[in-house]
């Protein structure tokens, strides 16, 4: 049983919670907040109360069962494509290493594929103590059912306290199946993972409501605590090839390889262009570009800088550039060293996808554009004047330099 | 202002507004520039049932009337007064059928019209017969079970794109205006061709074209009403259709006010938003007031027609004249408020101004409307004395 | 073909604004909508029905006011609408939600295909779709951008991947989550809206779907929100105004600095 409690001694009926509630579940009656049936226990009001008068109550929330104390260690679900471990796995090991040290336990990785033992060594270099490798021709390509069964089996056997995976196309397909199979909690797209000192629970922080608010989520009664993290949100450690670790090859159970869905073929579409998720410099265009024909300005500047091209959702929705260019909440999260936002107003949905870039330069003619709130350097001006000049200047310097 | 629309009418407004915002807004400038007919939008309006809002349920419509049509046209025109015409002009061409068609004719044509499968056009105007409709030269000669049409119609909205045409032609020239009749002519009938497509100032996403009849033979069953009733058909059609033109004008005006008000809030001069200047405030206040007055009049007339009022010629003309003059004034002022930007094609108000002009001209110029109003007044005054 | 579409009512996050003073959500005037991604699932369901016959049922779990989302689904052409509504569902996380939806779907009887949007725009977890598939032991493909073929009870689909796409084949019954590339959703029709107004929705409680009280609501949810806070401000940087010439020069200097570093 759970409920939202209004602490009557503290509540002054100020109404701050009314604004915070997304469900119209609160009202003020006789200078007291009253909760109605529409409350979904989302907790948005709790933080909004200046008087700490709202508390989310949950019976038995802190009760720790036997399985909680049995579980130990951090496990990272490594991701491979065409036999190559993807860099998101190294980022997961980076955060996994820290969590392992904070809990005083080991860090393991699970790698599923075909002929991937050599790749397992790289996972050790990036921080894994042990790597469980499952190999089979049947596992060469990602398969929702087989991968989920194998993963659930090794988690049951190893009993890690924490399992983290990439919030990638594969991770998003796979991990929810595993969490259901294990009957445990899963938090998507975490931007922060910390061990709470007193309780040793994993505090999983993620954006909610389109990035407008952040929520910290706990999984207190079940193990493992599972979380996914988007590519480029965490930082990988510097690989240490001399690190010692153990590669444990486990033969997959026959039954785990029997599946209903199968991949007929796998096609790469973005070959030849710079992948924005991996790029060090990104030049992005938004609604201010006014049309697909003007996106060549962005492309030319990107070329001069050796950068990738990105776009805001409105530019993609207008059909000026394909979806694969989209940066933001419903597109890709990027973390380049330099992000140039051209004609992007900076809707919160865009900001959550790029605000952890090292340097952000924004060019916009509207001085009130929200993008300037996150920009390291904001330039108020006409991008149609500025960008071509900038491109020419960079090109000129390139020539001089070479 | 709350006009206490029925739930169905509210749905019509919601649907039309959604289509306007999501589907028409992104293409209006392009279609205007290219003078392209909005077939994609026709499909969407058809799927949404908007082509049937003024047609009875027995014929596949949703059973509303002129008011329902006005709501849809107003809401679409708010975003594009040109694109909305594919619906408004179809309604104009359909009214003769609704008002004078036999049960058989209605059953044959109305379901496809209500479903938006076939567009309609009304063909009265000729090069020598505009305001003076009695001067039309197109003839229809009875020949056994057929009529044979000869002549050329000019500036026909939906011309070339529509499948069904309601055409006014002289069956007996000797009887003058009592010698005209109205016919249904289907696209593809031998002897029925399309002439040149006009290059227009505004409403450029609508098609305006010549219709050419050369010994065009149609079944006698395509006569609407009786022979000699042609002008009565036309006049009754206009009585019913003028609120639609007026609604188009109200929509265009409202769209221009929306743009002007939004711009005035955001545009800063002398360190503050221009909406804080009284000169701009007064302009916006006048625009809003005129639009609301026009809307109230249009709605009142449309409701009267739907309630069965027959004597609506004067009020229908008043609605058309007042709403279209309002649209012209408001759009000119909207361009003024946007200043240099307003004059540029990057902003939509110059298009709204171009679109507004036609509402003062077509379906009876505003001068003709005033003649209608005055002649009705004179009749009423004369009636009182007796 | 019996198709079930899972939908969720969400606040329209595109119109959510932050109070610049308090940095809290401004709720007033934020309309509730069908999760935009679910609109593609509804459309795909309707298209499959139009091509292969059958019926489309929309199902949602949510508070009483979520019935407006179901009515909107009917106005688009959905045949039946099912509302899983019970105070005991409150506070359900993705695990409990997928359990409840799976229990509701099981109650509806035989089906061929379950369609979900790829994720909900308020939670953005993308977990409930695959969760339902697992609860019902169904094969799944997530992030489907195209249905290539439906033949002899087998589906062939394109799944979006980071660098391209996979072509995946699977037997029915199955679950797909779809992306916005898959189609362009239709708008509601007037007749649909009138029908939706009068339509009877089927409402089912926790007891009616036979849900285990220990697996629903906050009790059945392993995860729970400990706190909610507004994201920290990234410090506002420098803003430059001036002539293009000068701005470009300063920009180049900054970029050069970056390239050296």
Image (cartoon, helix red, strand yellow):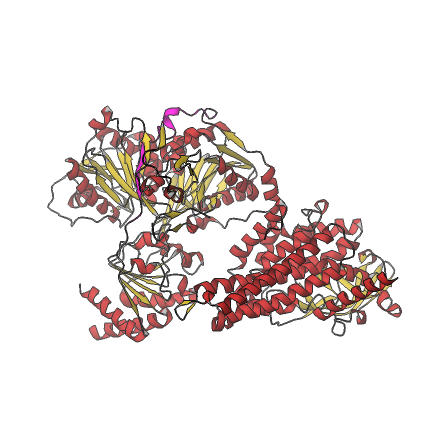
Residue C218 magenta-drawn? yes
User: Closer to the camera, A125 or A300?
Assistant: A300
Whole-percent x, y for residue B27 in the image: 52, 61
Q: Is residue A113 visible?
A: no
Q: Quadrant of the C terminus of chain A?
A: bottom left
User: Closer to the camera, A248 or B108?
Assistant: B108
User: Closer to the camera, B207 or B16?
Assistant: B16
Could you tell whether A275 is left or right of C99 in the image? left
User: Closer to the camera, A42 or C150?
Assistant: A42
Q: Is residue A153 visible?
A: yes
Q: Quadrant of the N terminus of chain A?
A: top left
Query: Count the marks: how many?
Result: 0
Image quadrant assignment for residue B367 = bottom right
Q: Residue at horizontal 14%, vertical 35%?
A: A104
Q: Residue at horizontal 28%, vertical 74%?
A: C246
Whole-percent x, y for residue A290 in the image: 43, 65
Image quadrant assignment for residue A46 = top left
Residue interval drawn in magenta: C205-231
Whole-percent x, y for residue A320 in the image: 42, 61
Whole-percent x, y for residue A238 in the image: 16, 50
Identify whether B66 is placed above or below C174.
Answer: below
Identify whether A46 is placed above or below B140.
Answer: above
Residue C69 magenta-drawn? no
As drawn, the residue found furthest toward the front would be A30
Q: Main secondary structure of the magenta part?
A: loop
């Amino acid at each position: 049983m759970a409920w939202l409690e209004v602490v009557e001694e503290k509540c002054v009926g100020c109404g701050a919670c009314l604004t915070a509630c997304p469900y119209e579940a609160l009202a003020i009656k006789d200078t007291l907040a009253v909760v109605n049936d529409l409350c979904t226990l989302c907790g948005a009001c709790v933080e909004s109360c200046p008087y700490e008068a709202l508390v989310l109550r949950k019976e038995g929330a802190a009760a720790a069962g036997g399985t909680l104390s049995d579980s130990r260690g951090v496990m990272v679900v490594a991701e491979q494509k065409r036999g190559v471990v993807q860099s998101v796995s190294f980022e997961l090991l980076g955060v996994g290493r820290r969590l392992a040290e904070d809990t005083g336990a080991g860090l393991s990785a699970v790698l599923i594929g075909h002929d991937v033992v050599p790749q397992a060594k790289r996972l050790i270099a990036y921080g894994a103590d042990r790597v469980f490798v499952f190999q089979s021709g049947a596992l060469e390509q990602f398969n929702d059912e087989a991968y989920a069964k194998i993963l659930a089996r090794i988690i049951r056997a190893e009993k890690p306290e924490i399992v983290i995976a990439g919030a990638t196309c594969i991770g998003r397909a796979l991990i929810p199946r595993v969490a259901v199979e294990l009957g445990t909690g899963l938090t998507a797209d975490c931007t922060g993972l910390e061990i709470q000192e007193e309780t040793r629970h994993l505090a999983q922080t993620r954006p909610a409501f389109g990035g407008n608010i952040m929520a910290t989520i706990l999984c207190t009664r079940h193990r493992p605590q599972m979380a996914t993290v988007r590519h480029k949100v965490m930082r990988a450690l510097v690989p240490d090839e001399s690190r010692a670790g153990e590669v444990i090859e486990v033969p997959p159970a026959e039954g785990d390889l029997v599946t209903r869905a199968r991949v007929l073929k796998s096609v790469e579409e973005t070959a030849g262009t710079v992948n924005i998720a991996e790029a060090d410099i990104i030049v992005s265009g938004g609604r201010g570009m006014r049309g697909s024909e003007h996106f060549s300005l962005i492309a030319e500047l990107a070329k001069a800088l050796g950068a990738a091209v990105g776009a805001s959702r409105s530019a993609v929705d207008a059909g000026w550039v394909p979806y694969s260019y989209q940066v933001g909440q419903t597109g890709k999260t990027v973390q380049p060293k330099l992000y140039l936002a051209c004609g992007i107003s900076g809707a919160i949905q865009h900001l959550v996808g790029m605000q952890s870039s090292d340097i952000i330069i924004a060019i916009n003619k509207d001085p009130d554009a929200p993008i300037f709130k996150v920009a390291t350097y904001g330039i108020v001006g006409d991008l149609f004047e500025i960008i071509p000049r900038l491109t020419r200047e960079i090109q000129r310097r390139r020539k001089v330099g070479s | 202002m709350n006009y206490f629309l029925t739930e169905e009418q509210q749905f019509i407004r919601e649907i039309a507004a959604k289509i306007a915002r999501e589907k028409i807004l992104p293409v209006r400038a392009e279609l205007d520039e290219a003078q392209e007919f909005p077939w994609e939008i026709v499909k969407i309006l058809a799927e949404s049932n908007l082509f049937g809002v003024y047609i009875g349920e027995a014929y596949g419509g949703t059973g509303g009337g002129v008011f329902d049509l006005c709501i849809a046209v107003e809401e679409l025109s708010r975003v594009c007064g040109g694109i909305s015409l594919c619906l408004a002009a179809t309604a104009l061409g359909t009214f003769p059928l609704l008002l004078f068609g036999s049960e058989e004719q209605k059953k044959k044509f109305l379901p496809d019209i209500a479903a938006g499968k076939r567009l309609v056009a009304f063909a009265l105007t000729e090069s020598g017969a505009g305001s003076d409709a009695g001067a039309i030269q197109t003839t229809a000669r009875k020949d056994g079970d057929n009529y044979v049409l000869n002549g050329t119609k000019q500036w026909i909205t939906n011309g070339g794109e529509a499948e069904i045409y309601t055409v006014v032609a002289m069956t007996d020239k000797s009887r003058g205006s009592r010698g005209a009749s109205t016919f249904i002519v289907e696209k593809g009938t031998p002897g029925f061709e399309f002439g040149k497509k006009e290059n227009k100032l505004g409403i450029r996403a609508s098609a305006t074209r010549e219709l050419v009849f050369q010994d065009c033979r149609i079944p006698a069953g395509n006569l609407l009403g009786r022979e000699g009733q042609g002008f009565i058909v036309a006049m009754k059609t206009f009585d019913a259709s003028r609120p639609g033109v007026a609604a188009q004008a109200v929509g265009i005006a409202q769209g221009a006010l929306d743009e002007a008000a939004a711009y005035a809030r955001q545009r800063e001069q002398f360190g503050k938003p221009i909406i804080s200047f009284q000169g701009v405030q007064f302009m916006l206040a006048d625009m809003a007031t005129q639009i609301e007055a026009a809307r109230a009049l249009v709605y009142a007339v449309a409701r009267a027609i739907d309630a069965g009022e027959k004597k609506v010629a004067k009020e229908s003309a008043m609605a058309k004249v007042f709403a279209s003059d309002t649209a012209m004034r408001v759009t000119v002022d909207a361009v003024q408020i946007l200043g240099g930007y307003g004059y540029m094609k990057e902003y939509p108000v110059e298009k709204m101004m171009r679109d507004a002009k036609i509402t003062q001209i077509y379906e009876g110029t505003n001068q003709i409307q005033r003649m209608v109003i005055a002649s009705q007044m004179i009749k009423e005054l004369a009636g009182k004395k007796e | 073909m019996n198709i079930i579409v899972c939908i969720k009512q969400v606040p329209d996050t595109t119109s959510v604004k932050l109070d610049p003073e308090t940095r809290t959500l401004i709720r007033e005037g934020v309309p509730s909508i069908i999760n935009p991604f679910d609109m593609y699932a509804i459309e795909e369901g309707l298209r499959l029905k139009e091509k292969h016959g059958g019926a489309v049922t929309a199902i949602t779990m949510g508070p009483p006011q979520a019935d407006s989302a179901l009515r909107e689904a009917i106005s688009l052409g959905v045949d039946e609408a099912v509302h899983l509504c019970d105070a005991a569902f409150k506070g359900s996380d993705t695990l409990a939600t997928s359990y409840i939806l799976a229990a509701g779907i099981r109650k509806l009887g035989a089906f061929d295909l379950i369609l979900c949007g790829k994720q909900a725009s308020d939670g953005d977890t993308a977990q409930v779709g695959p969760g339902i598939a697992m609860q019902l032991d169904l094969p799944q493909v997530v992030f489907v951008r195209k249905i290539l073929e439906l033949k002899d009870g087998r589906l062939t689909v394109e799944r979006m991947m980071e660098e391209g796409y996979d072509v995946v084949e699977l037997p029915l019954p199955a679950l797909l989550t779809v992306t916005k590339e898959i189609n362009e959703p239709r708008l509601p029709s007037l007749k649909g809206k009138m029908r939706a107004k009068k339509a009877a929705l089927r409402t089912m409680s926790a007891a009616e779907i036979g849900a285990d009280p220990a697996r629903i609501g906050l009790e059945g949810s392993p995860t729970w929100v400990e706190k909610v806070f507004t994201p920290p401000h990234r410090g506002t940087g420098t803003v430059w105004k001036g002539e293009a010439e000068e701005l470009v020069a300063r920009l180049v200097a900054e970029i050069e600095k970056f390239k050296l570093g």
